[in-house]
Image (cartoon, rainbow, N blue to C red):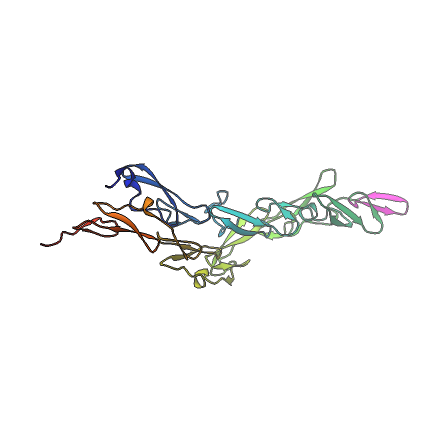
Amino acid sequence: MFNYSLAGCFPLPCANNATCTVVDTFDYTCKCPDDLPVGGKNCDQLLVPQNPNVPGGDCKVNPCQNGGYCQHEHHNIHACQCANGYWGRFCEQAHPCISKPGLCNAGKCIALENNLFHCHCSSGFNGALCENQIVGQTIVAKNVCDSNPCRNNGYCRPLVGNKDFQCVCSSNFTGKTCDLSTVCTAEYCGNHGFCQSKPMIGRTCSCDQFYTGKYCEERMSDPCSSHICLNGGSCYSTNYGTAYCLCSTDYTGNNCEAFRTRDCNSYFCINGGLCTMNNNRPVCLCAPDFQGDYCQIFAPVAN
């Protein structure tokens, strides 16, 4: 006899080894597995990783700044691998030796741990920032803007008691020293990307699927060309070169290679059918006049 209290989960609508829970007689919900980037009502749709802090979402619009590399961890989550001297969720933080060009004036900035630094002064200079020039026995204080750190006609303003500076950039330039152009042209990102201009970063390229590189000039191979999905599974690739298999109901695994173990406790035979195991798979023995995987088809036998 068919248990109508379980009808919402008949006949096993949740794909990719998701768990089915009955909501009411004719409805259900699927709990998708955490280790697969799938979603949707039946857990049969590939999810594209989304970054809520970046318009448009995924690693295609690279949220990682200062040359950081966006790396997918699992669905809806990304991580930035930062270049040396940078840190933070989006590599937005920089060591003072990088973020403050000319910090040590007439000296070399030595990066230390915990965001600390030391200025190694050139001969004839001293001070914590090598800001003082020694002339004979006299120490002459140096203006932080004397080295003209602002490029492209930018204007330098001393800050923090002459220990730092700010550049007021001319039109079409940005960055700490006005060294980054903000002018996007149709040719800048080639034929496989589009240019974006960002404050303090300048021009960046957001690449089309399967393209990478500073100017979207490098073609990546389709990961599905070498990723095999078995037993009727379908391969889907993401923008950053990762392939996933979406498996049919009876299989699971990275390549849909593993049979999804089921027994008669989770398999429903209706219309008087009886469930039995055959080669570790549940099958229905149907009553006369019925057929189909679940004995759901009325097919009267002619007398």
Tell which of 76 and 232 is nearer to you: 232
**Which quadrant of the figure contains the C terminus?**
bottom left
Which image quadrant for residue 126? top right
Indicate whether residue 131 is drawn in magenta: yes
Outermost residue, right direction?
137
User: For the point 32% across and 40% down, which residue is it?
Assistant: 28
Tell which of 222 and 164 is nearer to you: 222
Horizontally, residue 197 falls left or right of residue 179, namely: left
Which image quadrant for residue 272? top left
Horizontally, residue 164 falls left or right of residue 240, namely: right
Q: For the magenta stretch, what is the residue range?
A: 129-141
Q: Residue 15: x and y, percent?
A: 36, 49
User: For the point 28% across and 48% down, which residue is it?
Assistant: 275
Horizontally, residue 199 falls left or right of residue 237, namely: right
Tell which of 169 and 298 is nearer to you: 298
Q: Residue 80: x and y, percent?
A: 56, 49
User: For the point 29% across and 40% down, which residue is it?
Assistant: 8
Horizontally, residue 24 falls left or right of residue 47, namely: left
The chief SS type of the magenta part is: strand
Q: Is residue 34 in view?
A: yes
Which image quadrant for residue 142? top right
Q: Is residue 182 in view?
A: no
Q: Residue 158: x and y, percent?
A: 71, 41
**Which quadrant of the figure contains the N terminus?**
top left
How many labels, in total? 0
